[in-house]
């Protein structure tokens, strides 16, 4: 009798442990967990798919760029991502994204939150000043916004890998996939996307685009004025002057 009870208890323990292991494995494989960072993590098998793949100093001298609504939508569908803007060039894919609370571990340790959303509970936009007004030109802001990550190194490697694999699945000819959740980067990409949404050509902005991506991904020293800075000459405003 005692042996039978012991056997039953052991069976229950094994089943429970197996279920726990299966749940952990499912979580590591899914796009709800970008923070496990275990050895042989399934998301990171097969080699890194994002970032620089060569030492080509002209990798970001793109000849053209275009907005991909389809890939933007497919990347946005991933858990942990509130919105994504994907631009394709003759060489690369560039992804600007905002994160949300639909997944864990989207930031590496040390990457602190840049948004203060406490104003939502107080009926104001800017918690520091009490102002109810935001900046309509920005997609992501320091207040009442989805989340940005200033330094690309503080964005989860597993998240970047998942995004890059999704992009490469849909655009297999791209040489490199570069990903950022930097606030200014995302807001610039939003300005470029507005041009595409309005049916206007993006080629007049290729130099500005290359300046932005070089600054963020190749150590470029030059950066266009921040979108939020008065007097910034945006694509939409330039088209209105023509």
Image (cartoon, rainbow, N blue to C red):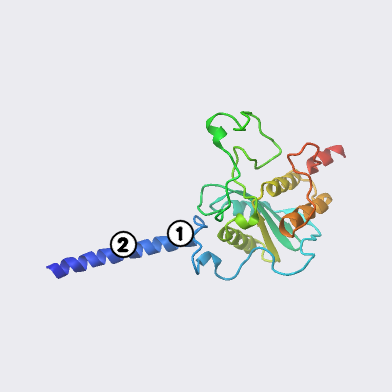
Q: Where is residue 87 in the image (x, y as percent from the top left)?
A: 71, 54
Element carrying mark 2: helix
Q: Position of residue 53 (x, y in %)?
A: 69, 68
Looking at the picture, does residue 150 appear above or below residue 167?
above
| Residue 174: quadrant of the picture | bottom right
According to the picture, the residue beneath numbered tag 1 turns out to be: 27
Q: Is residue 21 left or right of residue 225?
A: left
At x 77%, y 61%, the residue is 60
At x 63%, y 66%, the residue is 49
Identify the residue at the far right of this view.
242
Give the label on residue 16, or none.
2
Classed neighbour count for the residue bearing mark 1: other residues with Cα under 10 Å, few (<14), some (14–19), many (≥20): some
Q: Is residue 25 left or right of residue 110?
A: left
At x 60%, y 70%, the residue is 47
Looking at the picture, does residue 28 appear above or below residue 83?
below
Specify which label sits upstream in the sequence, 2 or 1.
2
Q: Position of residue 224 (x, y in %)?
A: 79, 47
Give the label on residue 204, or none.
none
Classed neighbour count for the residue bearing mark 2: other residues with Cα under 10 Å, few (<14), some (14–19), many (≥20): few
At x 25%, y 67%, the residue is 11
Q: In which quarter of the image is the C terminus?
A: top right
Element carrying mark 1: helix
Identify the residue at the far front of this view.
110
| Residue 127: quadrant of the picture | top right
Q: In this view, does 44 lie to the left or right of 190?
A: left
* Separation of marks 2 and 1 at Cα, in angstroms: 16 Å
Q: Where is residue 9 in the image (x, y as percent from the top left)?
A: 22, 64
Q: Do the residues labelled 2 and 1 touch (CB within 8 Å)?
A: no
């Amino acid at each position: 009798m005692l042996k039978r009870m012991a056997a039953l208890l052991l069976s229950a323990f094994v089943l429970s442990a197996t279920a726990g292991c299966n749940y952990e494995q499912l979580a590591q494989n899914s796009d709800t967990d970008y923070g496990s960072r275990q050895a042989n993590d399934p998301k990171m098998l097969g080699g890194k798919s994002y970032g620089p793949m060569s030492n080509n100093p002209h990798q970001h001298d793109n000849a053209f760029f275009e907005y991909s609504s389809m890939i933007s939508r497919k990347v946005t569908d991933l858990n942990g991502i509130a919105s994504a803007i994907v631009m394709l060039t003759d060489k690369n894919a560039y992804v600007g994204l905002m994160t949300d609370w639909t997944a864990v571990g989207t930031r590496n340790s040390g990457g602190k939150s840049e948004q203060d959303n406490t104003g939502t509970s107080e009926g104001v936009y800017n918690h520091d000043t009490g102002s109810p007004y935001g900046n309509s030109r920005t997609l992501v802001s320091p207040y009442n916004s989805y989340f940005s990550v200033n330094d690309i190194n503080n964005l989860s490697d597993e998240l970047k890998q998942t995004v890059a694999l999704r992009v490469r699945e849909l655009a297999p000819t791209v040489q490199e996939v570069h990903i950022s959740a930097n606030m200014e980067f995302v807001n610039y990409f939003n300005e470029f996307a507005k041009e595409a949404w309005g049916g206007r050509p993006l080629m007049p902005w290729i130099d500005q685009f290359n300046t932005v991506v070089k600054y963020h991904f190749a150590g470029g020293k030059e950066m266009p004025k921040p979108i939020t800075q008065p007097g910034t000459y945006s694509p939409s405003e330039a088209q209105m002057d023509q």
